[in-house]
Amino acid sequence: MTGKVRTRIAPSPTGFLHLGTARTALYSWAYARHHKGEFVLRIEDTDVARSTQDSTDQILASMRWLGLDYDEGPIYQMKRLARYQEVIAQMLAAGTAYHCYCTPEELEATREAQRARGEKTLYDRRWRPVPGKVLPPVPEGVPPVVRFCNPPEGDVTWTDLVKGEITINNREIDDLIILRPDGVPTYNFAVVVDDWDMAITHVFRGDEHINNTPWQINIFQALGAPLPQFGHVPVILGDDGQKLSKRRGAVSVTAYEQDGYLPEAMLNYLARLGWSHGDDELFTSEQMVSWFDGSHLSKSPAQWDAAKLAWVNAQYIKATPDATLEPLVAAQLRKRDIEADERLPAICALFKDRCETTVALAGWAAAFYADVTVTEADRAQHLTEAVRPAVAALADKLSGVPWDKASIAAAIKEVLVAHALKMPVLAMPVRVLIMGTAQTPSLDSVLSLFSRETVLKRLKEV
Ligand code: GLU
């Protein structure tokens, strides 16, 4: 490959960072990193009515959280209006763009007539200057838009990095508006000027943009600008086979951050959603970067699989050092108004094997910092009359032993022998009283992380 690879992600700040955009960002980032190129973040904020600073902040925060670092940006389109207008002026002078004074009513009347004839609704090019054609008189008080002189005939063909060869005939598309009367460009024009100015070589984006690409290619050509390569990534479908959307559950990166997913696990899962490297399911971002050369991208839609994401996250939680988990779990505990202490890394160590999220881990940790509730069902099942004397004896024993795991284990063993009980018969009720559940890691490990005082107090509730 000659020249430096430059990719970009260009989210519109009209909401949080959508999972689909995060995946496209990941592919663009990985492709640039693989080729030792550069990755640009551009904020496409020309939809002034719907763009908000809050959305931009959320998008930037999600990119940071995911670790998708960019070499340039954020570049805001609304700060580049003068540049778009400059290019528009050049196009008007060169005859590749023209003013159109149609009113919305006139446009609607044209569409209505086309619909009545069973035709596709396309702008009828009435203001397009053609040699020998007499244009209508310029109406007063109608601010013009600028339209692009799209070639009326011929095919636009490109070899898509994901989908292979795509051809769309120019008769399918019309002379699109590239500048609104207020001087703000439309998406298809701004995107071309930006990709050109920013020397973007490879454009990865969602396949909902396939129909925009012929316009963009035609504008690139009208400007004499080099064409980037395009790769249109299929949509992500929800569990129900419909496009992943807000109505069908969490679709923002932020929601997964809050729900206790790790960024490395999200990247791993998102990467596999539409791309593969053999049978590899778990890999680091570094591995992905070394493998991601733009091949093995899936042509068909990917299916969101919440259970698989949870499994991937569980694997990452298991493998993450306790010191790294600690602040994440502490933050989740704080949402429950719990301040953790120096025991938290050891608590993480003990419970992380059984957790899919840091929220679940915080759920276990909470038993060490706040009262637990023992359900009537657990009480009835585990705290039988037969076992109560042994629980009381254990409390008695534990009040006098050194407070460490080995001594606690020895105390439990002595009570088992004295009462001729098997471990689970005593361990279950003790777990229920101490942790609020009968399923926990080994009893001595759990108890040693509590203070003696708390253990004795909870055992007394027998
Ligand atoms: N702002 C567009 C979007 O969010 C970007 C599309 C593109 O990457 O060209 O869909």
Image: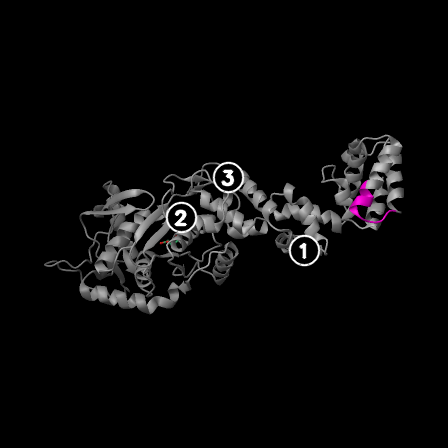
Colouring of the image: one colour
Amino acid under disc 3: Asp
Work out how far the residue at label 1 is from the one at label 3, CA to CA, in angstroms. 29 Å
> Where does ligand 1 appear, by image quarter?
bottom left
Which residue bears the numbered disc 2?
292
User: Is residue 406 covered in magenta?
Assistant: yes
Amino acid under disc 1: Arg
Residue 33 occupies which quadrant of the picture? bottom left
Amino acid under disc 2: Phe
The quadrant of the image that shows the N terminus is bottom left
Q: Nearer the viewer, residue 271 or 197?
A: 271
Residue for point 29% across, 50% down:
213
Q: Nearer the viewer, residue 35 or 433?
A: 35
Give the mark, 1 or 3, whose residue is nearer the N terminus.
3
**Crowding at label 2, few (<14), some or many (≥20) Cα neighbours within 10 Å?**
many
Span highlighted in magenta in the image: 401-409
Work out how far the residue at label 1 is from the one at label 2, CA to CA, in angstroms. 39 Å
**Crowding at label 3, few (<14), some or many (≥20) Cα neighbours within 10 Å?**
few
Does residue 373 appear in this view? no
Residue for point 22% across, 57% down:
221
Which residue bears the numbered disc 3?
305
Residue 420 occupies which quadrant of the picture? top right
- Does mark 2 have its CB less than 8 Å from ligand 1? no
In the rendered structure, the answer to whether residue 181 lies left or right of residue 267 reads: left
User: Is residue 441 covered in magenta?
Assistant: no
In the rendered structure, the answer to whether residue 447 lies left or right of residue 275 reads: right
